[in-house]
Amino acid sequence: MSLTPSWNRFLLLPMLTAVVAGGCSGYDSSFAYSERTTSLMPEAQDGFKGDTEATPAISGVKQLLDDRFGDPQDLKAWLKLPVEFGGTQSAVAEYSAVKGVATVKFSVDEGKSLPETASSVQFVSGAVAGETLLISNWDAVTGQATLEGLPPKEIAAGDSCVIDGGTVMQSGRVLYMRHCSHCHGTSGDGAGPTAQYLNPRPRDYRHGIFKFTSTKDVSKASRQDFKRVLQYGIPGTYMPSFLLLTDSEIHALVEYVRFLSLRGEYERKLVNELAGDFSQKAVATRTEGGESLDAIVAELKEMLAGDIVEAATSIGDGVAEDWSMSDTEEAVIVPTVARVPDSAESRRRGRELYLSKTLNCADCHGVDGAGNGPQTIAYEKNPITGEPYNEAGLHDVWDNLNQPRNLHRGIYRGGRRPIDLFARIHAGIKGSRMPSFKNTPHEDIWHVVNYVLSIPFEAEPGATGVPVAAPVAVAP
Ligand code: HEC
Ligand code: HEC
């Protein structure tokens, strides 16, 4: 399931848009734009119509988003995305057009094989780059295809293309609509019809933040992390296990979640560029303050034609880069020391660290690990709006109540193996209030893991031996 090096090179080619052939009708649910997008002034959402050569159209946020990501009906394989769309990477070996019949012989790299069936081909380079051509007849042995009609321009030997590109995305989409969208929403906003009844809420993928990963604190989730979440679910929450799906179904879902998250984060960051000055609210304040609407519109037009185009490119590339990086070896947390064997001494040391002022786990999880530390009763303010929340306790970046885990229950959402807990303490739980302890020596993290794993089995709270009243000072 990993990208081959040659596929990677191919992703970086400058010509990057190929429309994936439609297929899969019957889902008329379109991607929604976020509420932040629809609260921008109309011109920022929709751009400006052009009429002549001299005044070309200028894209607004919706167009910029659709250009890269399309719609469920019309998925765009923006090949720069670190998503495996599916299909067979291929090249034109021979081309001929005789008496209105176009015949192409396709070749694949050594070690790869041609697909059994083929119904369309997307061109990535050459004169017809970006076009999807339909195949009317396919010979899997020779790789010879008859195209439906003539191509709009000449095809030449060496042109690179993808046969039946988008198959993984299409099946990911169908599976997602069936199994996930009622909780996570069609566009991954975490607000499907079932979502309002659940606590914690289904993940809103649009932040590009995932909680339970084996990757370092600044990284996104790896494909392997998503696979684990889909296979085992998130114990203690409404996120179910999909262990009954096949490997290739899970694979398609993982790619589709990556796609939705990329799209959502791109939209969010793009809107951030404009919301301050061009949200409907900001425009109302500006006009009340004496600015003319015409001047504001002119200012927006200049931005959309210039700075925003550049910002869109760098945001898109940045988000794509982050997701690619999360699948590399450097992103994964690897302890520098082997697991410290579980022993009474190690647990005792772990409890000292737990209570210490340096790690201060007790501040949130409570001195005995019941999830009732002092922080759980404080009233917090929403960091974005500055308004206090209506309920006491910690909140995550999605604004949901986010109380520390009761460690007596022995239910670990991100996996219960010692290495999972190591990663949890090292990276924290992203987007939540569980912080990263990446600067803590790895040996100490193992002691804490040993202590945490022992908590559900303690005869009485604090049985590890370190009294609560007199915490032992621990050197940083
Ligand atoms: C019944 C509702 C429900 C369904 C159905 C559901 N999820 Fe979830 N999902 C959740 C909840 C709730 C969470 C958040 C749990 C938490 O925050 O601890 C979640 C979290 C996730 C996460 C985030 C994991 C992380 O580390 O942050 C992913 C990815 C995910 N779900 C994918 C899927 C996919 C793919 C499907 C369909 C195959 C699916 N979910 C179906 C409720 C659901
Ligand atoms: C600032 C508050 C805070 C501190 C400090 C803190 N935690 Fe947490 N911790 C949380 C919250 C909140 C959660 C639940 C997050 C979620 O699931 O969204 C959590 C969850 C956990 C979990 C559950 C992991 C899982 O997979 O379900 C463990 C274990 C844990 N913390 C251990 C620790 C340890 C050990 C320390 C100290 C080294 C610590 N925490 C420090 C807030 C904190």
Image (tube, helix red, strand yellow):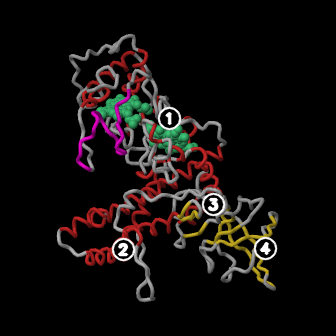
Q: Mark 4 to mark 3: distance in Å?
A: 21 Å
Residue 370 locus on image (x, y percent): 34, 22
Cβ of mark 4 under 8 Å from ligand 1: the answer is no
Residue 222 locus on image (x, y percent): 50, 47
Residue 166: image tag:
3
In this view, the mark in front (2 or 3): 2
Would you name the residue on which mark 2 appears?
Answer: 304
Q: For the point 45% across and 37% down, which residue is it? A: 197
Mark toward the start of the polypeptide (2 vs 3): 3
- In the rendered image, which quarter contains the C terminus? top left
Query: What residue span does the magenta drawing correspond to?
Result: 385-405
Q: Mark 4 to mark 1: distance in Å?
A: 50 Å
Q: Which residue type does callout 2 highlight? A: Leu
215 is higher (above) or lower (below) than 134: above
Q: Is residue 344 left or right of residue 471?
A: right
Would you name the residue on which mark 1 appears?
Answer: 238
Furthest residue toward top: 459
Q: Secondary structure at mark 2?
A: helix
Q: Is residue 147 left or right of residue 434?
A: right
Q: Is residue 390 left or right of residue 326?
A: left
Mark toward the start of the polypeptide (1 vs 3): 3
Cβ of mark 1 under 8 Å from ligand 1: the answer is yes
Mark toward the start of the polypeptide (4 vs 1): 4
Mark toward the start of the polypeptide (2 vs 1): 1
Q: Mark 2 to mark 3: distance in Å?
A: 31 Å
Q: Which residue type does callout 3 highlight? A: Gly
Q: For the point 36% across and 74% down, which residue is it? A: 304
| Residue contact at pointers 2 and 3, CB within 8 angstroms | no
Q: Which residue type does callout 1 highlight? A: Tyr
Q: Nearer the viewer, residue 282 or 170?
A: 282
Would you name the residue on which mark 4 appears?
Answer: 146
